[in-house]
Amino acid sequence: MKLTTFTDYSLRVLIYLAARSRQRATIAEAAAAFGISQNHLTKVVHFLARHGWIETVRGKGGGMVLARPAGAIGVGDVVRTTEGAVVAAECFTGVGSGCSIARVCRLRGVLAEAIAAFHAVLDRYTVADIADNGPELMRVLFADVTLASRLGAREIAA
């Protein structure tokens, strides 16, 4: 199964914020860290805030932080919410697919089982689990020593 770019960016934002340890970040900083569009990331951040995973503050001194501990944000929940209903094949839509074997096909059951297994694995992890390599994440995400110093991550310069 391939995740959409929206889901990918959503998970990246959550990892980024988890690596910052409750320090506010701006969309511009996150976009620069990942080399992605600020416009697209704005939509992602709005979505994450609307669903209660992050908090945002507008204006000078504003930014975004995790709305709850990283350990309370399930990766499976994020993926299900950002992806919506998973349509592994045309027959999952519930609308006549025009497939000549749809009435007797067993592939639909196999794919449904695979999707359930995919979600079951994701449900075992939280954002804290996938961001628990904080020092390595900090070195990669905050490679700019000036930015790192401003963020109070002095160990990065070492």
Image: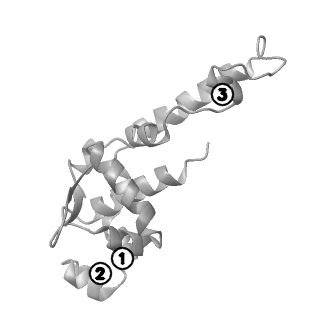
Local packing at callout 3 (Cα closer than 10 Å; few below 14, some 14-19, many 20+) is some
Residue denoted by label 3: 111
Residue type at mark 3 is Leu
Residue denoted by label 1: 139
Specify the farthest residue to the left: 61
Local packing at callout 2 (Cα closer than 10 Å; few below 14, some 14-19, many 20+) is some
In the rendering, which numbered label is found on residue 156? Answer: 2
Q: Is residue 83 left or right of residue 134?
A: right
| Foreground of the two, 73 or 135 | 73
At 32% from the left and 53% from the top, the residue drawn is 46
Residue type at mark 1 is Arg
At 34% from the left and 77% from the top, the residue drawn is 142
Q: Is residue 116 left or right of residue 138?
A: right
- The CA span between labels 1 and 3 is 39 Å
- The CA span between labels 2 and 1 is 6 Å
- Seen in the picture, residue 28 relative to 131 is either above or below; the reply is below
* Earlier residue among tags 2 and 1: 1
- Seen in the picture, residue 51 relative to 44 is either above or below; the reply is above
Image quarter hosting the N terminus? top right
The x and y percentages for residue 83 are 49, 40
Q: Which mark is nearer the camera, 1 or 3?
A: 3
The image quarter containing residue 92 is: top right
Q: Are marks 2 and 1 in contact (CB under 8 Å)?
A: yes
